Image (cartoon, rainbow, N blue to C red):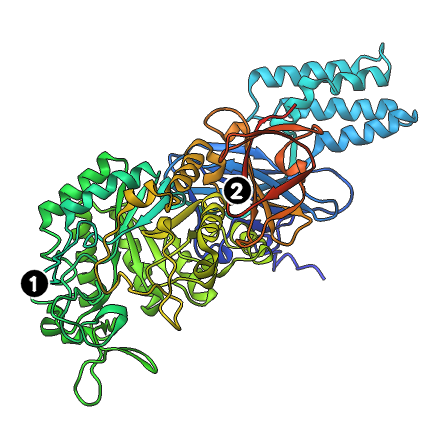
Amino acid sequence: MGKSKSNPIEHDALIGRLPITSVTPVVDGGDYPAKAFVGEVIPFSAVVFREGHDALGVELILTSPTAKVSVHRMRPGAAGSDSWHAVAQLTEKGDYKFQIRAFGDDFETWHHSATVKIAIGVDEELMMLEGVALFANAAAESERSAVEAKKLVELAEKLSDKSKSAKARLAEAEAPAVLKQMTQNPIRSLVTLSDVYTIKCEREFAGAAAWYEFFPRSEGAVLDPKTKTWTSGNFKTAAKRLVAVAEMGFQIVYLPPIHPIGTAFRKGPNNSLNAASGDPGSPWAIGNEAGGHDAIHPDLGNEKDFKDFVKKAKDLGLEIALDLALQASPDHPWVKSNPEWFTTRADGTIAYAENPPKKYQDIFPINFDNDRDGIYLEVLRVVKHWISLGVKVFRVDNPHTKPVNFWQWLIAEVNAEFEDVIFLAEAFTRPAMMHTLGKIGFQQSYTYYTWRNSKAELESYLKELSRETADFFRPNLWVSTPDILTEYLQFGGPAGHKIRAIVAAMAGASWGMYSGFELVESVARPGAEEHIDSEKYEYKPRDFKAAEKNGRSIAPLISKLNDARAEHPALRQLRNIEIHSSDDNSILVFSKHLAAEHSPSGKDDTVIVVVNVDPHSVRETTVHLDLAKLSIDSDTFEVRDLLTEKKFTWGASNYVRLDPREEPAHILYVTKRN
């Protein structure tokens, strides 16, 4: 029953005249902005439909942070899905706004009807009259230019010319120039707009970069053979390592905590409970009489030394990422100055970290609820202090053990003043927490990639990361950490390390590696999924040059992987991963494609990765490629292997033989599409 005049219909409360649903990228109905980085190609979609059989048009209206408006005609998806799609590359930092515009495509409705009827000689003049009215009315639309309006008037006149057949007049409306005009600036009716949604576009490193982790105290550390005592490395000695890191093609160097380390309950080698006098302790047990989170361990140097280190990195094209670990040693100055920032137990003692039955007496967790303003502002002060010394990237230790709303506040406060600062979440935990940390502001996150090793696991996970969660969760595919040494790496040897690096560097827009991975350090502490003699608890100087000279380093491969990423922008995208098939359950095949209009070179950039994920066996099989996903419409095409420089002619099906000890993968760049 309709509403009476005294109670008019509330049109705004109803669904739009042309329904628009399932808009993407939209996070939680628009509660959070979707994520993007400068240069990223973003897929947009919506489900749009209408009653009856008249033609429908759908457009993406995209407004940049500097108020530049672009309109992108959306294309229909699979038959019967009512889905519409478009892609756009974001090129500015800041908040983009977008909405979907649906409309009756009056030209296409008329054109379809005229084509069908004139073909059988029905209503020919009526269709011409309707065409005349269509184009005449369109010419009068205020938003059309004078030149465009003139062309429409001329077209209406041609349709009125009865000296020509209806078929000939219809052909005038089907001229390429007319069809192009009707696509670029359609004749719209029943225009309906979706809600306006936001995409937060950040600098490229927020979504695409290669990371390398090392401990400054190990670089240049020296053991006195007589006294068996260590002299710590420092920022000056560690700066020498930056050259090799840059030569391997990394862009961000992550340092574990560089602060003073507590002595109370200090851990010894292999996490033992009793440290000797010369044991350096875990850097994550932060704070002693020399200072806390805003201080530098005296063994590493002073603020000037740190600033020089940051400058050296910058000169080499590197950025420094610092660990932000919000926890304290019992010796931390905060314990005395602000005991309310910790949890006091019933017996009056401060609670140390526990994961029963494990106890971590060398660390006091922070309590964020006793004095919210106090601890919130103190952490903000600490972060700003390091920003003032040149740091723009923070790797956050265990953010999932702190309140989510604290992180939302902190990141918003920091990014409001320093838009280029990046926060990486080291959160190996439940999906809901990891995803929410991404939604509320973390630019990147560690992932489950570490434990996804088989072909099936990797296919499933790459689809999830690139399709299901990419709007709010930016994955950083770390192949190793000081804490984690998986069985795959323990028993995979050099082949296993190569395979993991290849998949991470090629599939991930961002990937990371802990120092020593290139030396295939893979001996585990008995009964644990971690390195024996962990660098977390002792100095570990490495002779990288000797290892490379003796062929015991995979650094040359790492360099090739990062070179490929630098040369091929398709590899620095995430959402463009496409999975292909092979006849072997250990041969993983995926591709990345960047269309010419989105590529700096102005040419299509397509890379196909075929990798044997079995580190123990030679595999030979047939690889099957979906050429449409590669934008290839010929039977054969030319490729060049970025690892070996070998050239091949490939097609839809291709034989491969991959020996993980010698050649675990093909990384194929499409050089010619024939």
**In the image: residue 400, left or right of residue 150:** left
Residue at x 51%, y 30% (from the top left corner) = 645
Q: CA distance from mark 2 to mark 1?
A: 51 Å
Find out whether the residues at labels 2 and 1 contact each other: C-beta distance under 8 Å. Answer: no
**In the image: residue 72, left or right of residue 265:** right
Camera-side mark, 2 or 1: 2
**Residue 290 numbered mark, or none:** 1
Q: Which residue is mark 2?
A: 663
Query: How many marks overall?
Result: 2
**In the image: residue 143, left or right of residue 477:** right
Name which quarter of the figure residue 454 lies in.
Answer: bottom right
Residue 526 vertical position relative to residue 664 in the rendered view, above or below = below
Mark 2: which amino acid? Answer: Glu
Coordinates of residue 125 in the picture (x, y in percent)? 86, 22
Location of the C terminus by quadrant is top right
Residue at x 73%, y 37% (from the top left corner) = 55
Coordinates of residue 36 in the picture (x, y in percent)? 44, 44
Coordinates of residue 241 in the picture (x, y in percent)? 23, 43
Residue 2 vertical position relative to residue 605 in the rendered view, above or below = below
Residue placed most toward the observer, 464 or 106: 464
Q: Residue furthest bottom?
A: 347
Name which quarter of the figure residue 64 lies in.
Answer: top left
Q: Residues within 10 Å of mark 1 (few under 14, many from 20)?
A: some
Tag 1 secondary structure: loop
Mark 1: which amino acid? Answer: Ala
